[in-house]
Image: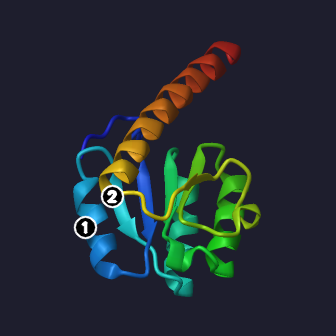
Amino acid sequence: MFMTPFQSTPSIWVAFRNQDEADSLVTRMESFAQGKKLQSAPEDVLKFIEDVHRTPLIWLLVDQASSDSRTLISAAEQAQHLNEFFRCVVVGSENLEAWPNGTIHLHANSLSTAILDRLRNESHALRIANSRLRHMRRLQNR
């Protein structure tokens, strides 16, 4: 994993009911992100929220089977309020309005490669935006 002093490596929490799929995604994203599995257990949700506080770039990736979880929706809403660079991707949600504004919704039949490519590209754009914002704030504080 690549890490800079500003922790620009994104943390991506994968909330998939199929644990084999979640394991595969976490393994395949190692080249550009720190992948973690999130189950609906309260302990996992607390770990996720703690990570939202610590990690500048953080994602929540949810599959269709978990997309109606009130616990995950609530965690995403809380994360959005706590971290300006939090982003959420939901694959195959039928209830788009339940998720926070700005959530990226992907088709239910999206290939894992397409999901990972989208996460990689969006994470790169977030790194650039985060870097520019940090630079602007440093200039303003002079």
Q: Secondary structure at mark 1?
A: helix
Query: In percent of the image, x 69 and y 18: which residue is there?
Result: 141
Q: Where residue 24 is drawn, which disc sits there?
A: 1
Instruction: Give residue 13's quadrant in the image.
Output: bottom left
Q: Position of residue 80 (x, y in %)?
A: 68, 54
In the image, what residue occupies the spot 74% across and 51% down?
Answer: 101
Q: In front: 133, or 111?
A: 111
Please determine whether, in this image, residue 91 is positioned above or below residue 130: below
SS at mark 2 in the image: helix
Residue 112, numbered label: 2
Q: Quadrant of residue 28?
A: bottom left
Please tell me which residue is depicted at 42% across the width and 46% down the height of the picture.
Answer: 119
Q: Amino acid at mark 2?
A: Ser
Q: Is residue 106 above or below residue 21?
A: above
The outermost residue toward the bottom is 41
The residue type indicated by label 1 comes to: Ser
Q: Which one is in front, 33 or 121?
A: 121
Residue, x 50% and y 45% (percent of image)? Answer: 57
